[in-house]
Amino acid sequence: MNTTLGTRIAPRPLGLSESWRRRLPLLPALVFTILLTQVPFVMSIWYSLTDWKVVPPTPRQFVGLGNYGKLVSDHFFRQAAWTSIELTVVPVLGSILLGTAFALLLDRKFFGQGLVRTLLITPFLLMPVVVGLIWKNQMFHGLYGVINWVIEKLGGTPVEFISRYPTWAIAATLIWQWTPFMMLIILAGLQSQPGDVLEAAKVDGATPFGIFRQLTLGHLRPYMELGILLGTVYLIQVYDQVAVMTGGGPGSTNLPYFVFERSIGGGWDFGRASSYSIVVVIASIIIATVALRVLSGLLKGEEIA
Amino acid sequence: MSDGPSPRVVGESRSVNGAFGLLAWVVGLAYFFPVFWMVLNSFKSELDANASPKLFFHPTLDRYRDVTKSTTGLLSFGEAFTNSAVVVLVSTLIVLTLAIPAAYALAIRPVAKWRDVLFFFISTKFLPVVASVLPIWILAKNLNLLNTRMALIILYTGINLPLAVWMLRSFFREIPRELIEAAEIDGAGLKGQLTSIILPMAAPGIAATALLCVIFAWNEFFYAVQLNPVQGSTVPIWVTTNISTRGDFLAKLSAASVLACIPVVLAGWIAQKRMIRGLAMGAIK
């Protein structure tokens, strides 16, 4: 087996070739990861090809792509898919814009810089369940919520945010929690900017706005892409905030919540629920392919260095 | 983050900088407001919390007493924190045990195609948990692991392992090659190199990695609620038990939330510089 791996180094006393000696420390982590991620994934694909209701127990039957055929006409699925898109795109864009603005603010010297940064990163450290619950119960609350208090002070009428605008309420909450993450990535980008180039531009008489548009933005691009892509793969999976803020419903049931509802959450239709989850995977794979291309571009630079 | 003065401020007037500093403070305080308000609410009586927002009130620790005293039947504070502590610490230890050798094999004496392996690890993070939760639930059920700490320990190890490998690799790469080669010439094997050079030199990076693992595992809700709804439940689930359908609960919920978030927020505040590097640079380098 060792010879096929093309190593030219003589086997060590242990009987392991150099390439296997190198590989050995990697194997436990690799095997664990494969067992825990790939095996369930393959099982999910198999489930999605069957008609299988667990409660009441019915015999599992192979139906091929039948579950996927039904997806197209499934009104609830389409609604959940659309909600998933909204609950991913809006928070990602909102948090990258806000995160960039915050990073630009923090990238200057001022009194108490470290303290302001600490304030700004805190939402990202909070438990997602807690974030959902405090926004629901203290910020968006129809009677005692802080936002409605402000609206009333300004002469407006209070709004039941959670029941009237569930998608926007959850999206706003997600933006609040994810902006610090984007801010940190952009900040890392800003601080890796070569100072001499900026200095030269300044000497040449470039305006601060000109410098930002022509130099900084170009330099930040890979960082923004990375933030958007990582944010997307995490936000497409959001479950916690949906579960605690609305517990599902039109405009807030996204695909992960829908899968849960239709399976262990009470639907017990494992066959069809699996087909929903495979759709989420396909969407994620498309995004991840782009993400990995960006990452590999960043890693290429490392080899030259 | 604030290493050395930024060259950008040269030539800009003091007042412009002052104005930006002020703006940053206003933004920071406004952004932090929901957290501040949660902490404030946790010291109120339910009557004060469930009223028009008030800044001045008679502070009390009673809500903290309410949420920490054992309630009959439901998940208690003590149980939830013990479960969380065990699950988080054990899974983080397993992650490090598996990830440190793996990172060595990807950074220091890299295997062939190390980049593909690295991408495989990180790509598993892109696989949504919904795609695996049904098979995992069925497997756990068949193995009698539902409602056990073991189920969560295994799953949280799986969640954090790819990230840990990724981050540790970037930290290990920064160790000077000459040191490792010198140890090798002295006849140190993997174990010797790890204990004499790599672990001491990468200790801050390893700590940052462990901290991120702790944060993700401590805050995890989805698997916990799916697999352990009855027993072995963790802190996020305990927080939700403080919501009641009858009567006011905001002050109690706030107190529970503060307790649930304190360990991770404090750790995050203390280690923020390293964590920022780990999060941002670990993902890039």
Image (cartoon, coloured by chain):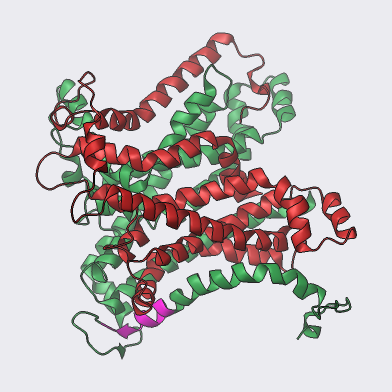
Chain colours: A green, B red
Magenta stretch: dominant secondary structure = helix
Placement of the N terminus of chain B among the 4 image quadrants: top right
On the rendered structure, is B266 left or right of A58? right
Q: Residue at x 30, y 67 (%)?
A: A259
On the rendered structure, is B229 left or right of B277? left
Q: Is residue A51 magenta?
A: yes
Q: Is residue B55 magenta?
A: no
Residue A35: % across, % down: 51, 74
Q: Residue at x 42, y 79 (%)?
A: A43
On the rendered structure, is A13 left or right of B250? right
> Is residue A222 shown to the viewer in this render?
no
To which quarter of the image does residue A7 belong?
bottom right
Residue A25: % across, % down: 69, 67
Viewer-side residue, A12 vs B160: A12
Q: What's drawn in magenta, residue-wise?
A: A43-52
Viewer-side residue, A76 vs B246: B246
To which quarter of the image does residue B115 belong?
bottom right
> Is residue A56 shown to the viewer in this render?
yes
Q: Residue at x 38, y 41 (%)?
A: B261
Residue A151: % across, % down: 19, 27
Residue B241: % across, % down: 23, 50
